[in-house]
Image (tube, grey):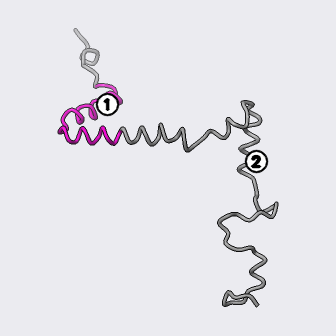
Amino acid sequence: MVNPILTTKRPPFFLRRCLNLYVDGFRNMSRTSRILWIIILLKLVIMFGVLRLFFFPNVIKSVGKDKEKQVDFVVEELTRNEYKSGEIPLWYDKHPSEDKDTNNSGTKR
């Protein structure tokens, strides 16, 4: 007697079913929809692949190939306090000492 559990066909693997879902959906699309999806995919490849090379340089590798130097660089950048040296960030519109010399109307005394 043949065991029915061993002879039954297993359902396809989960990832295989997901892939079949998308492939089947792409096959059944109209020509216009397929062209639009190809344009979207090309734009994503250009945005994340090509433009990344030009606008996001790898700053960590420019420090050196030594992992210890790279780690030190990252720690220094994350814990850097720009106000210790007295530097004022570019987005700050006025120097803190100017606050003392102004009244409520914003004009100097």
| Mark in the foreground, 1 or 2 | 2
Residue position for label 2: 76
Q: Main secondary structure of the magenta part?
A: helix
Element at badge 1? helix
**Mark positioned earlier in the residue sequence (1 or 2):** 1
Q: In the picture, which quadrant includes the C terminus?
A: bottom right
Q: Quadrant of residue 39?
A: top left
Q: In the picture, which quadrant includes the N terminus?
A: top left
Question: What residue lies at 80% left-to-right and 64% top-to-bottom?
Answer: 86
Q: Which residues are drawn in magenta?
A: 12-41
Question: What residue lies at 27% left-to-right and 30% top-to-bottom?
Answer: 20
Q: Which mark is residue 33?
A: none
Element at badge 2? helix
State how far apart marks 1 and 2 are (Cα): 45 Å
Q: Is residue 28 above or below residue 107?
A: above
Classed neighbour count for the residue bearing mark 2: other residues with Cα under 10 Å, few (<14), some (14–19), many (≥20): few
At label 1, the amino acid type is: Leu
Q: Quadrant of residue 2?
A: top left
Q: Which mark is residue 19?
A: 1
At label 2, the amino acid type is: Glu
Question: What residue lies at 30% left-to-right and 25% top-to-bottom?
Answer: 12
Magenta run includes residue 106: no
Q: Quadrant of residue 43?
A: top left
Most extreme residue toward the top is 1
Q: Residue 75: image x %, image y %? A: 74, 46
Q: Is residue 79 above or below residue 92?
A: above
Q: Residue 45: image x %, image y %? A: 42, 37
Q: Residue 24: image x %, image y %? A: 23, 32
Is residue 40 left or right of 57 when viewed as pictured?
A: left
Is residue 41 left or right of 68 when viewed as pictured?
A: left
